[in-house]
Image (tube, rainbow, N blue to C red):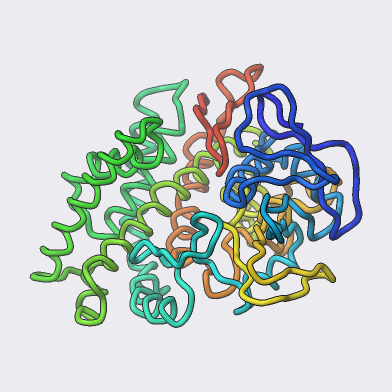
Amino acid sequence: MLDAGGWTSSALVRPACQPSRIRAGRGERTCAVFEENDVVRGSFEEINDVLGLEIHRRDGFDPGPELRALMARGPMTVLGVEDAPEGRTAWLATRYDEIRQVLGSDKFSSKLLYSGTAAGFIFPGFLTQYDPPEHTRLRRMVTGPFAVRRIQGFRPQVEMIVEAVLDDIEATGGPVDFVPRFGWPIATTATCDFVGIPRDDQVELSRALHASRAERSGKRRLAAGNKFWAYMNQVVTRTRRDPGDDLFGVVVREHGEEITDAELIGVAAFVMGAGGDQVARFLSAGAWLMAEEPEQFAVLRDRPDTVPDWLDEVVRYITSDEKTTPRIALEDVHISGCPIKAGDTVTTSFLAANRWNFPGPQDRFDITRKKPVHVAFGHGIHHCLGRSLAEMVFRVAIPALAHRFPTLRLAEPDREIKLGQPPLNMVALPLTW
């Protein structure tokens, strides 16, 4: 049902390929849908975007009841059907193999949905919105800065950033909110340095980027976004005159005539959004998990050689980005026997796939797990561009935190950590030691 707290699923369990049943209750509606013949119907965009987001609300680190109910129905379930003649179907993929099949197929498009259609609108430089051959051309030009050799060369700078942040936390004394004091400053400083934003400009630019996403007022979001883009345009102009050794500089030197200013700005904004937002959320969640599982992180601190795959397990368990934007079927295709028609959408749930065994013992966080399998960084041509950078930051920051604060714990253990709407977003994380 749909109540004041958001979407909640019915208790009915239906076989794979069968529509899920969600009823409208008395609470405030978050999208215009109604139930007819046991199928959710409404605006195609709202079913995909609003309902697709709501079902990924969590219970702490774990999948919430809405997603768990859908996971129980099989690897492919119906979110809803467009309220129109011959309306299209919005699907949800919840298992590893099906997700890889969708994301690895050229039969699906990642272009944005507008007015219920694949209108082909793309924000320049935002790789996740491109299909081949445009995606192939642009990704080829921007992969150079993420080469393993360059990332390893950047590691000493990240180590200094992390140590400075931990020094500041230690000097302040607990309790400290680790969202603005740990996750955010490490992620944004490292990402800005990598992109090529001068330190004097980073705080203001990071605020503008955050406000362009988080402000409740549409006018304020727009103003912050315009401020961010205006600054980035100045950086591009400066870099074309004198390219440095950062992301901007490397791309300009190697592909300056092939990439437009708009694409270059978009790539930088895309990387900063991923680095400043996704990496920050993961680092904060890692600190939270450390406070909840001190004995396991003691193994990482004291016997790191015994847990070579610790990062994959932390990434699997946290899954800081729960899902993809919907993929649009370009032709009829079958996934696990389910008939996906041209124009239908499939949302792939990384959280469901990575936590498939929840709540069983096989799903429990185990830092000693050998080679845990996950899709937290995606799959296929849109596999996370910045994975090498993100993983390097994680490998520096999480062990450093475990060493600096071995007694890290929740400052208010009886108070639930409040989460915002997905993706995984802690409103505050007060910790002490």
User: In the figure, is residue 67 to the left or right of 318?
Assistant: right
Image mark count: 0
Residue 353 percent location from the top left of the image: 73, 57
Residue plotted at (31% across, 60% down): 268
Residue plotted at (60% across, 69% down): 379
Residue 409 percent location from the top left of the image: 58, 27
Q: Nearer the viewer, residue 207 or 398?
A: 207
Residue 377 percent location from the top left of the image: 57, 62
Q: Nearer the viewer, residue 246 or 419?
A: 419
Q: Quadrant of residue 96?
A: bottom right
Instruction: Answer above or below: position of 310 versus 432.
Output: below
Residue 341 percent location from the top left of the image: 71, 70
In the picture, the quarter occupied by the N terminus is top right
Instruction: Answer above or below: position of 177 versus 284.
Output: above
User: In the figure, is residue 10 to the left or right of 40?
Assistant: right
Q: Nearer the viewer, residue 66 or 25?
A: 25
Residue plotted at (72% across, 42% down): 63
User: In the figure, is residue 331 to the left or right of 242?
Assistant: right
Residue plotted at (34% across, 66% down): 125
Q: Quadrant of residue 130?
A: bottom left
Residue at the outermost left position: 241
Instruction: Answer above or below: position of 397 versus 333.
Output: above
